[in-house]
Amino acid sequence: MTTFVFMYKLSFFSALLGSIMFLSSCEDETAPAVAYLEVTELLVAAKSNEGTSSAKLNTIWVEQNGQQIGAFSPPCRIPVYAGENQSLRFIPGIALNGVYSQRNQYEMLAPIEKNWTLNEGSTRVLSPEVLTFEYNPTYTVMVIEDFDGIGLNYNKTVQSDTNLLITSDTSEVFYHPGEMPNKSGKFVLPPVTLGEFKTLQAFELPKYGANVWLEVNYKTDVALTFGITANEVLQSAKTPVVTLFPNDQWNKVYINLVTEVSGYPNAIDYNLFFGSINTTDDTATVLIDNIKLLY
């Protein structure tokens, strides 16, 4: 499965400019008529067994009548061709591993397709309800831990100096409108300590370049690392994937595991882990929620 790289910019403006330059030499031709789409926000609607609907979609790719128009960051005003029965396809995008400059089409969400008549010079405002994406039924969505049940699906490792807890403190928990109950994971790190936690379950994951994603909500005082442990017959190999910077507000990250999973073709299965090291003289708190595995 191909990981899509953010394509700057197969711009409608370039196509339009080319058309105008070509048509300027043809007296019988006119420039194509233009309409506009106004996009404010991209949302997700998860089913009950797919966990939270929280999302951080920062890019939308637009195709019209099978032709790519471009990639745009909401809020935005998108120029498209005017005309009757225009076929439009909207593909959501995310920041790969939390890096804003590395934006990918996110195939775990199904594209939205519409057929509209677009009058020349008109602007069609696309409400968030129109651009609410659902998870693609082609792929598996596993809620690894939402911290709302009894017990935990993570154990602390032998290196860990602290325990993973469940908090319901309203000043700490992650909140998404309409979702209950509101509980989150938490671990506290005294000065110069380590917290590390690994899934109880090992997962059989697709290899050979197939995309595997991890979705997580987090808020942390110190750097937070996510990774995998590949379990082979005679050994296990622990590989960090991404380290996230501290942040004082809840954030959402989409972590791609394809390189690390496919890098161990002889692995029987894989565990997921996350952890932090506090090297400061102050106590640090790490909050985490809604860990999903998608492939």
Image (spheres, helix red, strand yellow):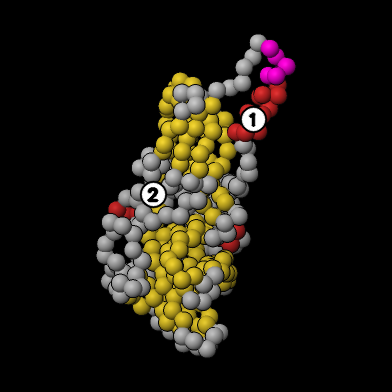
Amino acid type indicated by mark 1: Ala
Residue 15: assigned label: 1
- Is residue 46 visible in this depiction of the protein? yes
Q: Is residue 157 visible to us here? A: no
Badge count: 2
Where is 48 relative to 32, above or below? below
> Along the line of sight, which residue is nearer the eye, 48 or 25?
25
Residue at figure coordinates x 63%, y 41% from the top left: 9
Is residue 25 toward the left or the right of residue 41 in the image?
Answer: right
x, y percent for residue 235? 57, 73
Name the quadrant containing residue 21.
top right
Q: Is residue 73 magenta?
A: no
Which stretch is magenta? Answer: 23-27
Q: Residue furthest right?
A: 25
What residue is disc 2 on? 44
Residue 177 located left or right of residue 278: left
> Residue at 42% across / 27% down in the picture?
116
User: Which amino acid, mark 2?
Assistant: Val
Mark 1 surroundings within 10 Å by alpha-carbon count, few (fewer than 14), some (14 through 19), many (20 or more): few
In this rendering, which labeled residue sits more in front, label 1 or label 2?
1
Residue 186 image offset from top left, x and y in percent: 39, 76
Front one among 48 and 175: 175
Main SS, magenta residues = loop
CA separation in Å, label 1 and label 2: 31 Å
Looking at the rendered structure, the secondary structure element under dot 2 is strand
Q: Is residue 25 magenta?
A: yes
Q: Pick the residue in front: 141 or 45.
A: 45
